[in-house]
């Protein structure tokens, strides 16, 4: 049995070499010195996203990418003791995986990437709780929130650095991640409101939809922070499981 150890090591080395030469089905490898490397990376990103969206990639331990969950965000409208306050907890967003990379700019030498993404529609639901006065009505209560966000565009920046894995491959560490986003059309509403009546329910939903972009503006700083954190963690998970040799050669 001891005499087989060098053979096993050799076979293991040849196996890793074969993997490095042939990327898996969910990857498309790009050439570092290709003048069209950005277009190639865009294609590779969309190919990987398609597999993640269509059932995940069990080989790397990712089988479910939705919903995207945000623990809590809050908004404040007006000041003083009667100012309207609302918190949204256990936010679940569906449709994020239906994203498309429309543009990628890269600096391969420093492993920095700028990406533009588009998502046709995101549907969200959450539990909410509010207090204060809204439209001259006492709007304290709790219930269910829903939202539909169409025409979502996001810009993402990532700075990464390489590290050597125990298997001999090179992996990436996400050193910095930034993002911003915009939404073309928004529909939002609340349901099953406690301590409420039909008039207050109708008034709240009218206010929410009439001022949807302003409400999103109030939510955006916290939402952007939470989504950037989620993006950072998700990309780090991918980079920890997919060697750089599968992305670039």
Image (cartoon, rainbow, N blue to C red):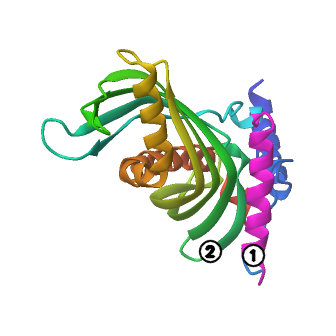
* Numbered range of the magenta stretch: 35-57
Task: Tell me, yes or no, whether the two marked residues, 1 and 2, touch with CB atoms within 8 Å.
Answer: yes
Residue 52 forms part of the magenta stretch: yes
In the visual, does 243 lie left or right of 186? right
Quarter of the image where the N terminus is located = top right
**Residue under numbered circle 2:** 106
**Residue under numbered circle 1:** 37
The answer to whether 216 is drawn above or below residue 180 in the figure is above
Q: Which residue is at the front of the view, 237 or 51?
A: 51
In primary-sequence order, the first of circles 1 and 2 is 1
Quarter of the image where the C terminus is located = bottom right
Q: Residue at x 75, y 36 (%)?
A: 56
Measured as percent of width and height from the top left, residue 191 is found at 51, 23
Outermost residue, left direction? Answer: 80
Measured as percent of width and height from the top left, residue 93 is found at 58, 36
The answer to whether 92 is drawn above or below residue 229 in the figure is above
Q: Which element type, helix, strand or loop, lies under badge 1? A: helix
Quote the CA–CA distance across marks 1 and 2: 8 Å
- Is residue 127 in view from this perspective? no
Q: Which residue is at the front of the view, 8 or 225?
A: 225
Measured as percent of width and height from the top left, residue 152 is found at 62, 56
Q: Residue at x 68, y 41 (%)?
A: 95
């Amino acid at each position: 049995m001891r005499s087989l150890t060098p053979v096993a090591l050799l076979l293991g080395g040849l196996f890793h070499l074969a993997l490095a030469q042939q990327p898996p089905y969910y990857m498309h490898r790009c050439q570092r010195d290709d003048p069209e490397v950005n277009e190639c990376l865009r294609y590779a990103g969309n190919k990987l996203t398609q597999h993640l969206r269509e059932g995940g990639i069990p080989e790397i331990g990712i089988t479910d990418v939705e919903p995207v969950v945000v623990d809590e965000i809050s908004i404040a409208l007006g000041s003083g003791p009667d100012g309207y306050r609302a918190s949204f907890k256990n936010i679940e967003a569906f449709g994020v995986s239906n994203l498309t990379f429309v543009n990628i700019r890269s600096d391969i030498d420093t492993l920095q990437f700028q990406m533009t993404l588009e998502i046709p529609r995101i549907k969200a639901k959450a539990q909410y709780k509010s207090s204060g006065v809204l439209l001259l009505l006492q709007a304290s209560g709790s219930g269910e929130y829903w939202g539909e966000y169409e025409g979502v565009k996001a810009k993402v920046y990532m700075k990464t650095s390489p590290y050597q894995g125990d298997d001999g491959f090179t992996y990436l560490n996400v050193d910095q991640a930034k993002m911003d986003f915009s939404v073309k059309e928004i529909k939002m509403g609340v349901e099953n409101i406690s301590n409420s009546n039909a008039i207050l329910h109708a008034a709240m939903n009218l206010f929410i939809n009439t001022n949807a972009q302003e409400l999103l503006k109030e939510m955006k700083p916290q939402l952007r922070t939470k989504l950037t954190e989620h993006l950072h963690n998700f990309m780090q998970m991918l980079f920890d499981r997919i060697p750089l040799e599968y992305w670039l050669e």
